[in-house]
Image (cartoon, grey):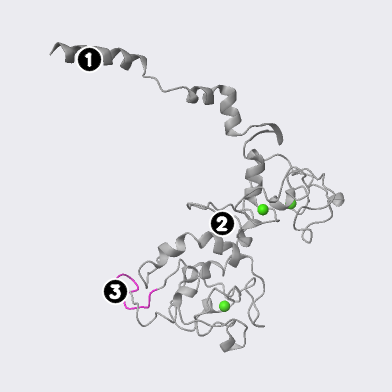
């Protein structure tokens, strides 16, 4: 599946946000337009589209930022929706497109290849993939980036947690530390029979399974969502712990571990030359003196 680049730098700019956007868009429900149904698209046609009026402009996701610069966006106030339209391609999630934006269809054409002369398509055709599949929650996606915005609400409940690095959540608080509207009262928690990590029994293992765990401070992670649990809170709480069979064996901060191993004490000593160099240096000096 090929894609074009109507504007230089388009794809690099969006490469790092694609995964986050995937969470946003994959989770949206029935579109606001009565005839639109993202979850049950009328057409199964997954192919890239080049005409202005095409199947990938139907049953679109209702994420307000998806295609707000397209004149036929059903969410736009121009078409009876609530979204303020844009005329700027960069305001859109064009990396998902499997069709040319109307903003570039006359100015950006394929110069060579099988689509020569046709308007360029900026995305990798997620729009076509959505004709078949809206995404599977059991698929883990790696985020290859220089950092994670732990405070992104769209990421907070979606981030994959590694059971091997976390203890089985406890439900020993009287009330949830955050997200009380999303989970049952702690006293009613019943873990999934086959998955003790799914402490609230809702079928998924995510940060919400720790909101009744008294060990976790929802403000432990300095970059996450204040007063709400996020994955960085779990890293700050358990990241220095050794986990075995879902239980904490021991927790040791790096400094504590170094002190136990005597590394800090060694570091505090003045640096000394290695034995070999100590032997060489007087030998060099004696040679210099002989000259
Ligand atoms: Ca839209
Ligand atoms: Ca759960
Ligand atoms: Ca937090």
The residue indicated by pointer 2 is: 149
Other residues around mark 2 within 10 Å, as few (<14) / some (14–19) / many (≥20): few
Front residue of 219/58: it is: 219
Image quarter in which the N terminus is found: bottom left
Q: Residue at x 79, y 53 (%)?
A: 176
First in sequence: mark 1 vs mark 2: 2
For the stretch drawn in magenta, what is the main secondary structure? loop
Numbered disc 2: secondary structure: loop
| Mark 1 element type | helix
Q: Going 57% across and 66% down the picture, which residue do you hit?
A: 132
Is the shortest distance between ligand 1 and the CB of mark 3 under 8 Å? no
The furthest residue to the front: 289
Q: Is residue 71 magenta?
A: no
Q: Is residue 116 magenta?
A: yes
The residue under the point 62% across, 36% down is: 240
Residue 274 horizontal side relative to residue 131, left or right: left
- Give the residue number, with chain letter if any, for mark 1: 285
Tell me the magenta residue range.
111-120
Please say whether residue 134 is visible from this viewpoint. no
How far across and down, in percent of the image, does residue 195 sit?
A: 74, 44
């Amino acid at each position: 599946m090929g894609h074009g680049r109507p504007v230089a730098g388009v794809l690099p700019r969006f490469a790092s946000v694609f995964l986050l956007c995937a969470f946003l868009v994959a989770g949206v429900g029935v579109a606001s337009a009565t005839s639109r149904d993202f979850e049950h698209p009328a057409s199964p046609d997954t192919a890239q589209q080049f005409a202005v009026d095409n199947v990938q402009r139907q049953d679109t996701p209702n994420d307000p930022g998806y295609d707000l610069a397209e004149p036929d966006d059903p969410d736009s106030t121009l078409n009876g929706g609530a979204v303020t339209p844009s005329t700027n391609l960069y305001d859109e999630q064009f990396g998902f497109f499997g069709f040319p934006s109307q903003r570039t269809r006359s100015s950006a054409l394929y110069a060579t290849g099988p689509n020569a002369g046709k308007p360029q398509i900026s995305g990798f055709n997620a729009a076509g993939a959505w004709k078949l599949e809206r995404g599977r929650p059991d698929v883990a996606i790696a985020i290859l980036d220089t950092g994670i915005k732990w405070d992104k609400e769209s990421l907070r409940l979606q981030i994959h947690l590694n059971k091997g690095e976390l203890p089985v959540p406890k439900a020993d608080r009287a009330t949830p530390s955050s997200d009380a509207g999303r989970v049952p009262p702690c006293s009613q928690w019943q873990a999934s029979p086959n998955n003790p990590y799914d402490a609230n029994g809702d079928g998924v293992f995510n940060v919400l399974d720790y909101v009744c765990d008294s060990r976790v401070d929802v403000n432990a992670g300095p970059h996450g969502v204040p007063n709400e649990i996020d994955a960085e809170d779990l890293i700050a709480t358990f990241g220095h712990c050794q986990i075995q069979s879902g239980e904490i064996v021991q927790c040791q901060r790096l400094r504590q571990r170094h002190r136990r191993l005597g590394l800090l004490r060694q570091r505090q000593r003045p640096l000394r030359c290695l034995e070999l160099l100590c032997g060489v240096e007087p030998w060099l000096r004696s040679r210099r003196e002989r000259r």
